[in-house]
Amino acid sequence: MATIKDVARAAGVSTATVSRVLTDKGPYTPETQRKVKEAIEKLNYQPNGLGRYLRKQETRTVIAVFPDITNPFFSQIIRGMEDEASAHGYTVILGNTDNRSERQNNYLKLLEERRADGIILTLARSSVEEIDSIRKIGPVVLACEHFKEGEFSSVAIDNVAAAYEAVSHLIRLGHTHIAHIEGPSDIILSRDRLLGYRRALRENGIKEEWVLQGDFSLESGRSLMGKLLQEKRRPTALFAANDKMAIGAILEAKAHGVKVPKELAVVGFDDIEMAQIVDPPLTTIAQPKYQIGAEAMRKLIAMLQGQPDPVLHTILPYTLEIRQSCGA
Amino acid sequence: MATIKDVARAAGVSTATVSRVLTDKGPYTPETQRKVKEAIEKLNYQPNGLGRYLRKQETRTVIAVFPDITNPFFSQIIRGMEDEASAHGYTVILGNTDNRSERQNNYLKLLEERRADGIILTLARSSVEEIDSIRKIGPVVLACEHFKEGEFSSVAIDNVAAAYEAVSHLIRLGHTHIAHIEGPSDIILSRDRLLGYRRALRENGIKEEWVLQGDFSLESGRSLMGKLLQEKRRPTALFAANDKMAIGAILEAKAHGVKVPKELAVVGFDDIEMAQIVDPPLTTIAQPKYQIGAEAMRKLIAMLQGQPDPVLHTILPYTLEIRQSCGA
DNA sequence: CTGAAAGCGCTTACAG
DNA sequence: CTGAAAGCGCTTACAG
């Protein structure tokens, strides 16, 4: 690999001059520019980022970490992040933790090592103490959930209110036996959605009878529905903390001859593509995914540029998408 | 942020000694180690990766680039890559190109800047010249498709043979009017799957009547099926270059009252999760996804360590998953 | 407009 | 076992 020294030698100038041409600032004559560009061309030179960023003390790169990056729910979120980042000259690198905290730590380490300027976490799988220690590592923004117990910048819908609305929809349709399949309880938004479910039941004088814990996978929705079907008393409605588990539940119910929505009404959360494909199409909470991603990135970049957003928790609107999984 | 100098000062030693303790090699007394570790602890010191890797001339980081990272098809591939990488002490950062070549170039630039040691491309969207010039940038492995026109290391199934088998399955079931929805033709595996389709038709004396081009999205499968349904002559079977398009086609056909598989048999490619959820469940080609990812990473790391795999194109086995979308 | 020099934060031969 | 020094590849005040 050619270095800046090689280019300087080939162009007959100093490395300082090459650098000026390279960074396109500092004065130089057209003739100097020509010579340097020629040398760069000839040597097929590409500046070494490690040297450059070590000197500049910034990388113009940010990391976005996901628990399961291939969940199509994140598709538009990533798009929003990338569009916003590239508009400001930042590159996004993506991290996938597979729901494993050591993997999350791997990416946090990249930030600690200063190989990126900031980080966005979607669904921090962390205790209050852990999440607070993350803040000390560097600039962080939380996406898809709010962490209210600290000075933690975040962008998300109001998960409590959205869950409340989803369950209220079932109650309005006449249901009084409503089960909930929650997400892993070390994830903030799981707890928030459970909270919204409970609030809706309580305000309507409905007893909480079934709360089962899944892991957001289709398979867990399937097997937990299997369990519910074996009970003597069965729910007439189900609110699942995400679409995949809702869809798993529908498939399992149908496999057991239970009619959806006639014998079991189902509401999901996220509005992934599959929600429209399952039969019957799933009623669910839709989030402004693209905007969540873009907004989280905007907030992070604002922090990096020393002008942090005065709004700590950015709350975006959600909508209830009514399809056929709850009946008319 | 504390630097190695701060630690050296606090511990009353030289930076060289701190570095020795840090990298856990070079000799030092237990007492020295203790002092240094204490200082590191006290200052909450974390070595700067830019400095370290600039000096060491390697980053132990590799980039894996995907055209659409949230396509669930890539889920297991990523897992395979990450497991293999972390077994060798490498960190994987993921890139998403959204099918845009400038985005692909962004990630290639990270390699050029030496901020990563190597790169894996899945579905290179490149002409022969472009893809060859990529090789000059640094160590590259191609995953999910083979590029036969150059010295390009790759890991994939035999896409031609797999497509041939998928179409042969339809022919064995008695179909002679078989349409194909192909992928974007600048993607190698699209061309390979088209090739397999054509070979199967030719060897069975069947005329090629409908080849439409999609973009791998559900939506494109839907709209192209819509077009097919408006033709005077209609196919009795369809081979789509991926599952998403196959599923889109099924949904559209059903929406027009066409019975699947009775009036239209459909075969897809990839065996994504959705393939089992659509009604009827989709017959499709399954690839050893995890193994593709792990094998591609193994090959890349072997290159980085100066012991390149003597096998240029690693060909892995596929299977035809027979479900209900083609009838009995 | 240009170059020599310093320095970003590390690691590692070289001496002692 | 330890430190002083060189150097990885850049950029940028400082002089001229």
Image (tube, coloured by chain):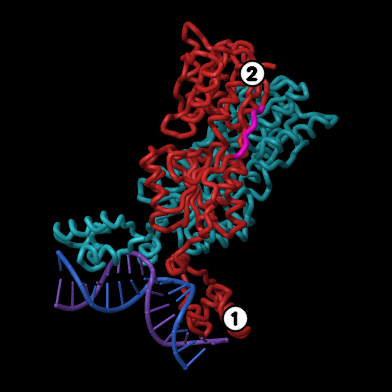
Chain colours: A cyan, B red, C blue, D purple
Q: Is residue A294 visible?
A: no
Q: Of the residues tagged 2 and 1, which is closer to the observer?
A: 2
Q: Nearer the viewer, residue A256 or B182?
A: B182
**A118 and A161: which is toward the camera:** A118
Q: Position of residue B108 (x, y in %)?
A: 41, 49
- Helix, strand, or loop for circle 1? helix
Q: Chain of mark 1?
A: B
Q: Which quadrant: the C terminus of chain A? A: top right
Q: In which quarter of the view is residue B31 placed?
A: bottom right
Percent across and percent down for residue B131 are: 40, 43
Q: Earlier in the sequence, mark 2 or mark 1?
A: 1
In this view of the protein, which residue sits in the foreground, A13 or B158?
Answer: B158
Assess whether residue A165 is covered by the magenta stretch: no
Mark 1 surroundings: few (<14), some (14-19) or many (≥20) residues within 10 A: some
State the residue position of label 2: B326
Query: Can you identify the residue that label 1 sits on?
Result: B33
Tell me how far mark 2 sits from mark 1, CA to CA: 69 Å
Placement of the N terminus of chain A among the 4 image quadrants: bottom left
Local crowd size for mark 2, using a 10 Å CA cut-off: few (<14), some (14–19), many (≥20): many
Residue at 54% from the left image edge and 19% from the top image edge:
B203
Query: How many numbered badges does the structure rendering display?
Result: 2
| Above or below B142: residue A47 | below
Relative to the observer, which residue lies in front, B36 or B55? B55
What range of the chain is rendered magenta?
A: B316-321
B33 sits left or right of A212 in the view: left
